[in-house]
Image (cartoon, rainbow, N blue to C red):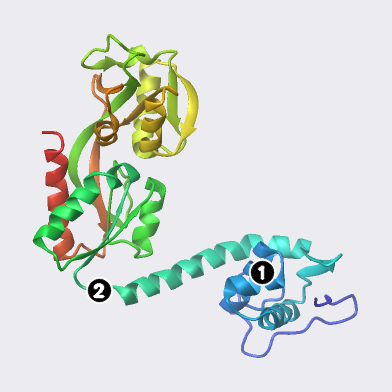
Amino acid sequence: MAVPATAGQPRQSPPRGKTPPPGRPCPATATGWAMRFRQIEVFHAVYTTGSISAAARALHVSQPSVSKVLHHTEQQLGLELFRLVRGRLVATDEAHALFVEVSEVFKRLTSLQKTAGNLRDQAGGRIRLAVVPSLGLHIAPLAIARFRERHPETLFVVQTLHHDDLFEALYERTCDIAIAYDPPAHPRLKRRELDTAELMLMFRKSSLPDAEERIPLGRLDGQDMIGLAVGGPVGELFNLELRRQGVSVREVVSNQTFYVAAALARYGAGMAVVDEFTARASADANVAYRPFSPSIRYTIQCMHLDDRPPSKEASQFITLFSRILRETRE
């Protein structure tokens, strides 16, 4: 790889016209030379894969092409980024420091490319929907099937995402509308409440043979519970209620979705607190569910970008989705 300039040897200066304006930092530079996206892409690939050949395969280009871009980048920066040690490519300290900055730039540039592609690929008569997983296994499929009975020309693109990923999907235009539980406020989002629901306790009938119609939260004190590592606003709502009432539970398993929590409860790993749609879909002859007393309620809301309101078809689907939410509880 390139050898950095030593004392008494001037670094190679960037060509004329390439020096950034005063006071404006360039991403990942050592000499004021701005790295182009192709250079960032190649450096990122080599650093994360650990070899020229693996980076070439990841980028679908030839090995000489990757080597040329990387060598040119080192020359422009005046830094040695990788060394060959015992036949293996090893990142230098400078490369480690550079990667911290480059990874953020790479993420944003990749997001920009994805957004541009999604804008280009948008087509009429298509609804791109993102929902939280617990709505994606019953309510959303039912709503989509019902909608297409009336509008067979409409196409759907559906993805299930956790709360933390929903705004990114909207921002990158990988979805047009997102439906979630109690989504946090955001200046770029518009929200529409579709319905309200409540949390349920799922348990094997043998573990609570005398279960009331509504379970006081105090009955969970000291019980083995299945917790949510990524509970979103609803998980936080339940934890807040536990703290408010001074109830202490023993979390024996942690997972990331209500449906996995329900399955764990079904097999006797512990009791689980889930949304009511998951509870209804997961109960069987051996597993029951009950609401709490007092009830712990949350809202189901649809979100879209403030500057990108839903299409006519999407608005009709949102109305139908809201109606199906109510029907499932009647």
Q: Nearer the viewer, residue 284 or 36?
A: 284
Residue 211: image quadrant is top left
Task: Place residue 9 in its image quadrant.
Answer: bottom right
Q: Amino acid at mark 2?
A: Ala
Which quarter of the image is occupied by the C terminus?
top left
Residues tagged 2 and 1 counted as in contact (Cβ below 8 A): no
In the picture of the structure, the residue carrying the numbered disc 1 is: 54
Residue located at (77% from left, 77% from top)? 78
Cα distance in 3D space between marks 2 and 1: 36 Å
Q: Quadrant of the N terminus?
A: bottom right
Task: Name which residue type carries label 1.
Answer: Ala
What residue is shown at x 29% (from left), y 32% (from top)? 282
Q: Is residue 12 left or right of residue 293?
A: right
| Residue at (35% x, 23% y) in the render | 241
Q: Position of residue 28 (x, y in %)?
A: 64, 69
Within-10-Å neighbours for mark 2: few <14, some 14–19, many 20+: few
What is the x, y in percent for residue 97? 70, 61
Q: Pinpoint residue 188: horizontal percent, then vertical percent.
A: 32, 57
Tell me the residue that label 2 is attached to.
Answer: 123
